[in-house]
Amino acid sequence: MQFFQVKTVEETFALIDEKIPATAGKEVRELKEALHYILAEPVTAKENVPGFDRSTVDGYAVRAKDTYGSSESMPGMIVLTGEVKMGEVPDTEVRQGKAVYVPTGGMLPPGSDAVIMIEHCEDVDGLLNTYKQVAPGENVIRKGEDIKQGEVLLQAGTRIRPQELGALASLGITEVKVFRKIKVGYLSSGDEIVPYETETLLEGQIRDINSLTVLGLAAEWDVDVVYGGIVKDDLAEFQRKARELYDQVDCLVLSGGSSVGAKDYTIKVIQSLGKPGVFVHGISIKPGKPTILAVADGKPVIGLPGHPASAMIIFKLFGERIIRRLKGEVIKKSPERIFARITKNIPSSPGRSDYIRVRLEEKAGEWWAEPIIGKSGLITTLVKSDGIAEISSEKEGVSQGEYVPVIPSR
């Protein structure tokens, strides 16, 4: 395998989609405990929602044609003959020239085809003056209009958000089959890396902050995380600890040791974990070119750059997509972006995608992105930023005032 046969960002996304399978593990969870899980099978509606024609307003169920011509200056007149109570089936049919009071959510009585809002009427001793005409179906939800019996409500691969919970609950579903929660492991490497709790640093030492930033991102994506500690630049020890952590998790993340150098053991360690091995070694991107992606016996392995800002940007871009694939989620697009106007000229090299940390500010109803210039190893540039602006590989930079896509931070 040749070193640094770089892929474009687009090629890397495509390879992730091609090579990363959903985790095989599935489980049945109670609906109230299924938030953010991914459906492992489609859900088909076994009943209509709503199960009956219902009113969307407080008003009077009528035959729409009985209100035609009604206006403030020339009100219509309809006889009020009854009332529908919530949770009850109406026992009064709406005949020509008649009306029945119905509350919001109440069942529409037979014979009616519309509801006129209470504020558009006046009840004068049982004679209803109507000051507005309504059309058939107005202020009414028909049986099955929201969800039809027999239709596929949610496809497999759908992430269950609060709104999906509500839709499932409306059908009386109490449990769903989902892909199980995945586990991500992280291992730092390097002779210079020491635990972040280290109070006093010796010359040349660096605190391990990537373990917190990378695993913090993973935790935001609703996965379990395992910290494997720090390993020195010793191949045998690196392989032992990587294998130990690999056996416990669904995805292994390694940080450090991915740049060209005599102590670069990451490729050998990853290749020793299983087949087919590395499928991306280098991405045409700044920061984060020396990124490694692999699959070892069905498990993805990610080799991140050691610089904290680079590691976070790469893990946000590609690690999140890998984790979403593992979780079984159907991915329809790249990471969510907003469009903002850049506040200054930013040069870029064609053929390489650049990701610039930016601070977002709203001015006159538009988002503006102010670049935060700093070297890739500076974690404070991420602290000060609200997202990362993308300059695609076919551009030679962007001009002040130009719209750029921005991946916002959570």
Image: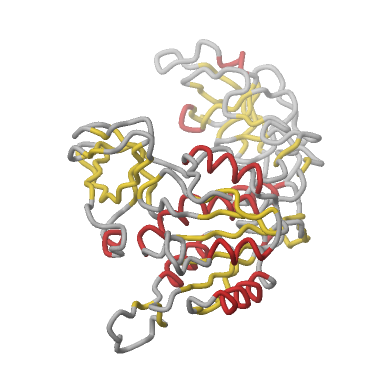
Give residue 199's quadrant in the image: bottom left
Q: Given the current orientation, which residue lies at the most extreme top position?
A: 69
Task: Tell me which residue sits at (71%, 41%) in the image.
Answer: 155
Q: Considering depth in this image, is 250 or 189 the residue closer to the camera? A: 189
Relative to 70, 39 lies left or right: right
Q: Considering depth in this image, is 334 or 367 the residue closer to the camera? A: 334
Task: Tell me which residue sits at (56%, 16%) in the image.
Answer: 67
Q: Is residue 301 above or below residue 343?
A: below
Q: How many marks?
A: 0
Residue 138: % across, % down: 58, 24
Relative to 85, 233 lies left or right: left
Task: Tell me which residue sits at (59%, 64%) in the image.
Answer: 268
Residue 257: % across, % down: 46, 66
Residue 305: % across, % down: 43, 60
Relative to 218, 45 lies left or right: right
Task: Tell me which residue sits at (49%, 68%) in the image.
Answer: 215
Relative to 223, 385 lies left or right: left
Residue 364: % across, % down: 20, 37
Q: Is residue 394 above or below residue 32?
A: above
Say how the picture is coloured.
Answer: secondary structure
Q: Is residue 175 above or below residue 358?
A: below
